[in-house]
């Protein structure tokens, strides 16, 4: 990993994203679902909600870096709550 100048937290982050994509692909194949309409009033599937969660979590973390002086781990807690809310209501 040194040739890319990656740190272990960065590598773990990308491994988690890859495993999420693989898991959601397997779920989509084994358990197909019909899209549902949530609070956004658009049809979404599990993959759509995952994308919304990842995009929102990126913005939460960027805002946290720019606006908060507390540890970044607290942003992870906020992202986890956000993910639960997205998968439940969107």
Image (cartoon, helix red, strand yellow):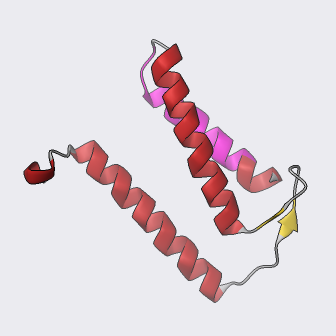
Tell me where residue 29 sits by quadrant.
bottom right
Q: Residue at x 52, y 15 (%)?
A: 67
- Residue at the far left: name it: 3
Q: Position of residue 82 (x, y in %)?
A: 67, 41
For the N terminus, give its image quadrant. bottom left
Residue drawn at the location 74% of the way across and 69% of the way down: 45
Specify the segment rendered in magenta. Answer: 70-85
Magenta span includes 84 = yes
Q: Position of residue 53 (x, y in %)?
A: 63, 50
Q: Is 44 colored magenta in this rendering? A: no
Q: Is residue 28 left or right of residue 90?
A: left
The answer to whether 56 appears left or right of 15 in the picture is right
- Residue at the extreme top: 69
Which sits in the foreground, 4 or 49?
4
From this viewpoint, which residue is outermost toward the bottom? Answer: 30
Residue 62, x across and y down, in percent: 50, 30
């Amino acid at each position: 990993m040194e040739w890319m100048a990656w740190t272990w937290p960065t590598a773990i982050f990308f491994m988690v994203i890859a495993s999420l994509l693989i898991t959601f692909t397997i779920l989509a194949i084994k358990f197909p679902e019909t899209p549902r309409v949530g609070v956004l009033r658009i049809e979404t599937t599990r993959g759509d909600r995952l994308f919304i969660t990842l995009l929102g979590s990126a913005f939460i973390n960027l805002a946290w870096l720019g606006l908060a002086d507390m540890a970044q781990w607290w942003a992870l807690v906020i992202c986890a709550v956000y993910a639960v809310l997205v998968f439940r209501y969107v």
